[in-house]
Image: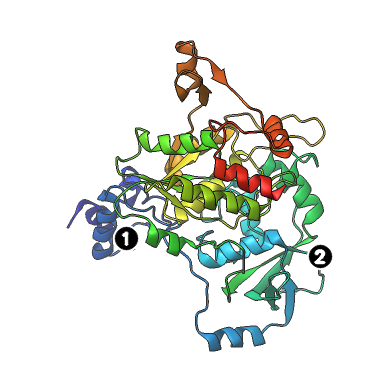
Amino acid sequence: MNLLAILLTFNLAPTLSFLPNLTNLKFVKPGIISTKFATKMLATAETKNQLAVPHGGELIDLMITDPQAKQECIISCTKSVTLSARQLCDVELLCNGGLSPLKGFMAENDYKSVVENMHLPNGLIFGLPIVFDTNDESIAAGDRVLLKQEGNELGIAVLSVSEVFLPNKPLECMKCYGTSKLEHPGVQMVAMERGKFYVAGELEGLERPIREFDCKGPAQVRAELPEGCDVVAFQCRNPIHRAHYELFTRALDAENVGKDGVVLVHPTCGPTQADDIPGDVRYRTYEVLKEETANPRIKWAYLPYSMHMAGPREAIQHMMIRKNFGCTHFIIGRDMAGSKSSVTGDDFYGPYEAQEMAMSRSNELGVKCVPSLNLVYTQEEGYVTADYAKEKNLTPLSLSGTKFRKMLRDGEDIPEWFAFKSVVKVLRESI
């Protein structure tokens, strides 16, 4: 009998805090785990560089595969709803396990717990509430609602309604976004886009949404990741330029990343801020860059996620989701998921708030943080850290986003140290 089995057998489970990822699993309680299962869990904990254990211990899969069962599920529906682009993203991630351990949209008790405490009622950390909004007063507990994709009326999932409740939106905004001002894009979304009611209930998945770009689920991505090595997630919502590429490739040299580690570039391709580049255009820039770089240590996948611009809380959400996709590490960028006031232009969050939040919750999440390097391009030595450039008195070059967009529109040459030619070509074609 090994150490973990002995601890569990003699009701000493609280001493398990030194074992990675085990205290996150809510079923680790004294006297309820068999010796055989305990042995298996210890073997998993002692194995280095394995894919991350899904959040909550199990990767959820709500998809129905049998055609007859799908048809029966559809026939049982009492109502139908056409999903918004944001809702479609949430439904897809719930059904494929990207939002494990959830099996549907949050009930009021779950919603309140996440909003106020950033944890589910069972104590599991969770960054932002996952809710289904509506203005339809006829939807009630007991309804089975067919959720359809806009434009093609494809049945994506069936929602078994367990509860309909009135959310406390001002509190939700203050807790999740740190403000209730409509100048914040997330607050504006909650207050002005979402419906009056939130609908809770479990989902049964029917079909994957039809998109221009294929969004592989966690099980598919995990199957394609190399075994026995660290996986470093890089989240972005904009086209990748040279500085980004240097940042995530150099992350593989971080002290807490194994020598055979890989990067999973995992951009969000759902709705973001109003002035962001559309998802289909971003997708095309990623595809051409993937071909241009052809780096075997970089893996690519696309995430159907709707950005909230919630800064620190959203950093936790992104880490949790990438954990479900098998990532062991997560790159935390400067001002990650941050946003500015649409009135004053002031930042809602400090430049390192998301990093600080992520690092403070890293052990609880079971995902290691890789802080992003502050890189600058210099005439003398190319990309180096800002501190190194200052120490060596190097000459940094810079190009603002505003200037870059103007150069794109005017057909001017974009310096290759700033952007990849293939990416520039796609962006110009979309103007």
Q: Picture coordinates of residue 112 (x, y %)?
A: 66, 53
Give the camera-side residue of 220 and 352: 220
Q: Is residue 402 above or below residue 166?
A: above
Judge depth for marks 1 and 2 and give the one in front.
2
Q: What is the distance, in whole Å, between disc 1 and disc 2 at their CAs?
A: 47 Å
Q: Picture coordinates of residue 72 (x, y %)?
A: 60, 88
Q: Picture coordinates of residue 346 (x, y %)?
A: 74, 29
> Is residue 286 among the parts visible in the rendering?
yes
Going 47% across and 34% down the picture, which residue do you hit?
Answer: 246
Q: Is residue 329 above or below residue 383?
A: below
Going 46% across and 46% down the picture, which residue do you hit?
Answer: 365
Q: Amino acid at mark 1?
A: Gly
Q: What mark, if any, has residue 263 been given in the picture?
A: none
Q: Picture coordinates of residue 35 (x, y %)?
A: 24, 63
Q: Is residue 39 left or right of residue 106?
A: left
Give the camera-side residue of 389 and 39: 389
Q: Which residue is mark 2?
A: 135
Give the camera-side residue of 215 and 83: 215
